[in-house]
Image (tube, rainbow, N blue to C red):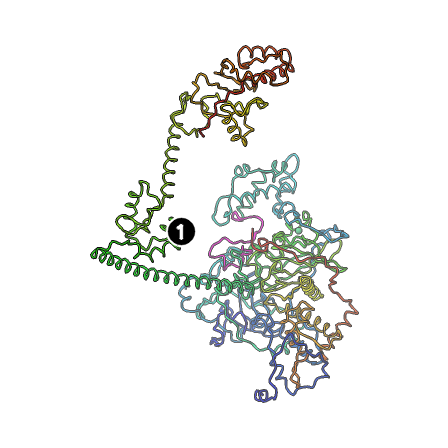
Amino acid sequence: MAPREASHEPAGTPAPVETGIATLAQLRAGVKAFVDKDGEKRKAEILMIQTRAGKPKFYVHYEDFNKRLDEWIDAARIDLAREVEWPAPEKPEKKKAVASKADKAPPKVDPKNPKRSRAQIEREASGTPSEATSSNVPSKIQRKDSELLVTTEVTDGVTPKPEDEEMDVVDIQDAAAAAKAMPDEEYSREDEIEKLRTSGSMTQNQAEIARVRNIEKVQMGKFEIEPWYFSPYPIDFIDVDMVYICEFCLNYYGEETQFERHRSKCTLLHPPGNEIYRDDYVSFFEIDGRRQRTWCRNLCLLSKLFLDHKTLYYDVDPFLFYCMATRDEHGCHLVGYFSKEKESAEGYNVACILTLPQYQRKGFGKLLIDFSYLLSKREGKLGSPEKPLSDLGLLGYRAYWQEVIVDLLMDGRIEANIEDLGAASAMTTNDVLHTLQNLNMLRYTAKNQHVVVLTDAVLEQRERQKAKEKVKGKRSIEGERLMWKPPVFSAASRTWNW
Amino acid sequence: MTQRVTGQRFRQRKLSTKQNLQVLREKEIEQLADDDATRHIPKVETGVEKGEEIEHHLQAVISAAQAAAQGGGKIAQLYIPTPDAVASKLQYEDLYPKRFTQPATYIRFSSTVEDSIGCPYCMTAEDVAWLKTYNKKHKGAPCSEDDLEQAINFFEETTQTKQPYASVDNSPVLTYEELESEFDETIGESARNFARDIYIHWKDERIRRGNRPLMPTLKFETNLETDDADPYVCFRRREVRQVRKTRGRDAQVTEKLKKLRKEFEEARFLMSQVKRREMLNRDQLALDKQIFEQRSAVKEVKRRLSIKTDDEDILINQRVSLTIPMSGSAMLTASQPAPRPSKAPRLDTQMLHRNMPGMNSKSQPTRPDGRLVDSDLTYLEDQLAKKADMIDHFVDENLMKHQKWNEGWVDATWRPITPPLEQASAKSDFRRVFTDSQLPTPPASVSSEENGDTIAVNQAKQLEPRRSARIRFATPPDDVPYQDQSRFRRRTGRGGRIMVDRRGVKRQKIEAVDDRIADRWKFAGDSSEDEQVYPVDWTDNLHIRYRIMIERQGERHAQQASRRAIENHNRSMSGHSMPTGGQS
Ligand SMILES: [Zn+2]
């Protein structure tokens, strides 16, 4: 069961799903069909349908795949030979609110602009869900037996060649098969907004409009990057093929001419704050959201493209941003960052953390995490990242925690105390416990005692890591290079004081 | 399985995070038959959202890692697949020239994005095309890219301030005149030259976009209902700061509640005490009433039996109770209002009338009618004080009246009221003089035996503490007619000169020197016999004229002369007592 689906179905009780054979014309938002994904048929939910160059395009979300793999596909990839699942009928009281006329109205497709028009998106964006009547909206208000909605004539196209060459997907298929689905929590829209109001920088769920990526591509520095998620960049950008982002000031431009013009004027060469750490490899800059509001907003907009649960609901004032950059003659290139509340009630030492996709899988994530714990050590506090973690976040943290804990346990000690391990690493006891448990290192002996076991597997992993470091060189944060005192803020500057 | 766990000999111990645990290698521990025991260690949440925890790729990686941790052999290098990031086709070197040189010290920087990007408006391809054609047609200096951006930026920003809802409310594009009137230093001289032409281009662009801003902008909150649901609305202000939940805050709340409870209990205690007091008051009133009734009964009996003894003896305990704890009359009336509420006021007025004509304290205890006196006593001190107050008040009042009458008038009459508490009246500038304090040297020759000496000496002593003041006021002596009184006036003339005028300066009566006195003087001093001593009236006009004359001859002489003259005068004056105001 896809996590997104659950929000419309009562938890625990499996809702009766109506299935049947559909024609291409009957497909609409909310329908789940089998889609060819890298040579394999996967169930996917259609979130949006558009007509581009006279052909329908479907924005689909694959069940049990992360949203970042959602994509636009041609009709040919949809397996209409298999039954599809119709979206669950809307609750009666909501059904009343829907004008059936509107339901049947053909989707307005701007012939000039095959994509959604900006006005349309705006209407969808600010409208309440029950009023959203456009068939493009992935809404559940349409009745399952309503008439066909896509009026554009569709001809069967050629089977598209598989474009995506997702690595490792096939290898790990079997391993993942064991993963069991769990009933998801249900969130109403009200809950969701309430969550946004009261929770920190991470959110649990998002409005429906935000389920579809709104930026096609971004150009930044030497790279072109495909965004992963929705980000509230100016609504005008849904019409452009590429958003150009200045590597230094992070300003965004929808047109190459404008961007080039900007580059001729922009004088920034590094994140606009104080350098607090420098080694041969990277520099860290500390930036106050209150003093550098524009830059930090730009950073948040950018990182939202790659962080599903990040919320930009509130402004950047109560956060500090620790930005990691590599240096060359062109300037200091932003590689990743983490944000941190000036005052965290829950004791989080990281709010959001991101290595920009163009720099991922190069070990920068570990440096960011390590740096966040170094700051906590300087503050004399234990820290933990704000939840929820993303999948990549969890893996990054687990790897870091394992390395730190195993290293501590390997220093020759014969006894270990969970709180001491936490104090030595600025990790919370919960995270220490989580790590030991996850690595199967906490055991209960026949002598009725808890013991910590340095398992062969863990030791072997560490050896391999060491060998790798010998070849590639070990990248680590050196505490003595940090020139930083925990900043002190007045009550006013911690808050949203304009 | 569960049975086996419960059937174990030892109870599972809870894992303590403070407890030291042995660190062992895998080979050092005996493998338990099953890992039930480890299940008793509470599972820690991953922190990943439940719905996502089960995602295919994450689970694949986790499972692989777990397999590895359990020693499940080789693990493939697994990654969660992510969308692509590829090398850009743009010419990086051109866009980002090599301008950065790393300083030796850590960078410190506080300029903002706004400070660093120049004009925020950046030309579009349309702008570039327009500029090209414009500069071809236009004669004279060409319009630069910066001028164009500056002008458009000015138009954009002015529109933003003047029509914040331009994109929503269909308001027309501002006219050039409207914009021109707002020109300020943000639009440079050269940009202004082209402003009118640029305006036409800008207006076209603006209309093409439905009067929306030319530069894409973020959506901020509008405080409308739709804000919350709109994912494009971002960076809201947080209205209320979240209340932090801390142990300290909890403790604070507890303390507040404790304090509140204590205060409530104190209030309750106070109320119960008030109640008790009022009960006692009621009892006392009942007793008082009883005493009163019994006394009247006794009185009746006494009257019937014609017993003429003092009433005092039957009231003895009453008086004791009142006199011992209360010493002053003030206390008597102030602290005892309750016991005899009906009796007191009536008797009080009677008493006042009766006591007025000079009752003294000895007659207090009893009254002719044999009635009880104690509570109705009026003490002499009070009466005297009252009287004194009344007198003082009367005097004060009349003094005020008098001053009012005299306002704007010079009071040349004898003072009608005895105590001269009045301030020095500005009406008469003439003041009396005390000679005794005025004289530079005391009259050595004044003899104590002489008449009036005692007064003079007394006066001097009395004035001792106020020596510094030379001139003071005095009421005129009764025995000297007004014309004869000597008076002085001090006034300030031009240039701040201070002048002393005098009037009615008495001429010494040249009386026949008493023979007896003359005789005594005969051999006084060290003067020779030939030297004759003449009594001189130094205030005589003749003498004054003489002194003035001398003055003209030289100050020293004058001083000496005057001193001598004064001495002479003093000698001559001896025995004359100056009139003093002794009434005050
Ligand atoms: Zn820039």
Q: Quadrant of the C terminus of chain B?
A: top left
Front residue of A208/B70: it is B70
Q: Residue furthest right?
A: A470
| Vertical position of residue A440 compared to residue B484: above or below | below
Q: Which residue is mark 1?
A: B327
Residue B195 lies in the magenta stretch: no
| Vertical position of residue B27 compared to residue A128: above or below | below
Which residue occupies 54% across, 14% down? B537
**Three-letter code for the amino acid on which mark 1 is drawn:** Ser
Q: Quadrant of the N terminus of chain B?
A: bottom right
Residue B228 lies in the magenta stretch: yes
Q: In the picture provided, is B90 more to the left or to the right than A74?
A: right
| Vertical position of residue A13 compared to residue A342: above or below | below
Does any portion of residue B29 appear in the rendered image?
yes
Front residue of A469/B410: it is B410
Q: Which residues are magenta?
A: B209-237
- Residue A332 screen position, x and y as percent: 72, 55
Q: Label 1 crowding class (10 Å Cα cut-off): few <14, some 14-19, many 20+?
A: few
Front residue of B444/B502: it is B444
Does any portion of residue A152 appear in the rendered image?
no
Which residue occupies 54% across, 32% down? B465
- Residue A463 screen position, x and y as percent: 76, 75
* Some atom of ligand 1 lies within 8 Å of the CB belonging to the residue at label 1: no
